[in-house]
Amino acid sequence: MYTGKIRQILLITDGCSNQGEDPIAMAALAHEQGITVNVIGVMEHDVIDEKGMTEIEGIAASGGGVSQIVYAEALSQTVQMVTRKAMNQTIQGVVNRELQQILGRSKTMEDLPPEKRGEVMEVVDELGETVELEVLILVDTSASMKQKLPTVKEALLDLSLSLNARSGDNQFSVYVFPGKKNDVERLLDWTPNLQNLTSIFSKLTTGGITPTGPAIRTALTSFNQKRSLRSLLSDDDESYMEESI
Amino acid sequence: MMNHTWKNQYKLSPGTNVTGRWHSKQYKIIKELGFGANGVVYLAKNNNTQVALKMSDNGMSITSEVNVLKSFAKVQGQETLGPSLFDVDDWQVGRGNSRPISFYVMEYIQGPDLLSFLEQKGKSWMPILFLQLLNDLDKLHGSGWIFGDLKPENLIVTGPPPKIRCIDVGGTTIEGRAIKEFTEFYDRGYWGLGSRKAEATYDLFSAAMMMINTAYPKRFKKTTGGIEQLREAIRLKPELHRYERVILKALMGHYPSASQMRSDLLDTISDQPKKDSKPVSKGSRPSQHSTQSPKGNINISRRDFRKKKKKSGWLEFFFIAIVLSVLYGLYIFLKLL
């Protein structure tokens, strides 16, 4: 069985970036490194303008992930659905590539007769249950997000509940942007459980700018740091699941 | 990318012919039955039989649901909780190079959903339908599956005679895995009362929440969460008092199987007149028990004891009489010789 690892960035925001690099380019950079970028746009009484929408969809598209715009009350359900959906997409990508090797070029699951597809699906399901998952959560804490932060916290706790029901391991890390001193600030280092968020989240302050691009760039280094630390500890080669386009 | 515009893009107008590219069966769309996150369900006609046809741009979810329906058919035999599966295929729209759309065809289950049925026919049907449901769940769990997304919208009452069936198997998960799909109100994770692991107790929690739902058709939001809020919700509705014990036990995950919850529910309904005369608050009941029943026990056992004593007395008497007469007979026999 494939023992890879799925790496995702989950960006929770409510509007357009206004400082630093182009977030769509940064998402593309993440995708190049085998990291999927998913975006959730949260609305409450406000509505995300067209510019914000285009950016949200653009980030997900170039990050190889999933995007969704929701009202704050539906956030919990959406966060877990988006994460799962993106995870399944990645697994499907891997399975499709394996299939291509067996069946020859340009064959994917959809080219199989429906009867055979079921067996492949069982493999996909099995992988979704057991694969190791790393999710880095990037939360926009610009001023307009202030009222939505308690809901975001609830949704993240709910996400860890959903994912921890799987038998595969999970690692979460939480970053907020803008941070107190820098563009981005680490709130929680890699951990299998998000329970600790409860105390940290209440102390959060919100700021004015939205440096989405730099936030994604910093998030990427967090994945890389982790990789180099791991390689110091153990010699085994880690394989990563990468999305096939 | 998530497809927001699926509905508009693929909205099929009545009369559209859908032909499968693998099995070449033809289906004529009659109307749209429902629309969910995982696709659209149409009422369709094939050789004058009405069928339900589910279509999705996400071929994976179609395949996944087909897998569930197939395994249902294998285990459960004739009367299944879910719809029977007729066909799985892809539909090539137009002649272009566009991606074919996956669909499957199943039995058309007709009737009102659970809550509408109870509104029409009265609340007295509530326990009966839940007995049916728990029976079906027991069979399902026995075959290693957990329903997952159990909610009134997914349950249809067909008939007559009324029989509960489910129409959406999208959340059905292999036991022990993480629940695939759920709805907050019926999810024990949302209420802080357990994990999202697919276990029998997960479905029984949802079933108990549906029982509460029958008294609160509009549901309610989580405030404090936990068992306290739910207990309070039951208390506020007199119609739920009779089932309070069963509901709470299921909410706390104390029923290891659907059949045990079923038999408890059955008991609750059967001794209804007795229970009605008793106060719902549990204060006075146990004390009555403790004063009356031990006395009764003593009376019975004494009477029994005496009876036994009488019986054994007679036996003793006959035994001695027989032994004596045998000995006397032997004595006479020997004397005569």
Image (tube, coloured by chain):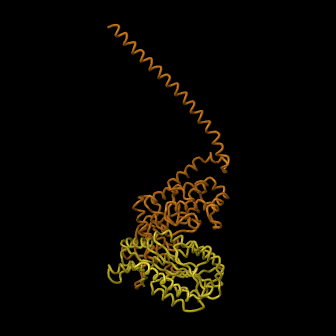
Chain colours: A yellow, B orange
Nearest the eye: A75 or B90:
A75
Residue B68: where, in percent of width, then height? 43, 66
Residue sticking out furthest to the top: B336
Q: Which of B243 and A181 is in front in this view?
A: A181
Decide if residue B66 is on the left or right side of residue A83. Answer: left
Q: In this picture, is A238 found above or below A168?
A: below
The quarter of the picture where the C terminus of chain B appears is top left
Residue A232: name its quadrant.
bottom left
Q: Residue B3, position in %: x, y?
A: 51, 81
Locate residue A44 relative to residue B28 in the image: left or right: right
Q: Is residue B163 above or below residue B4?
A: above
Measured along the vertical axis of the image, is residue A61 above or below residue B270? below
Q: Is residue A206 visible?
A: yes
**Furthest residue to the front?**
A233
Give the percent coordinates (x, y) of residue B171.
49, 68
Q: Residue B134: x and y, percent?
A: 51, 57
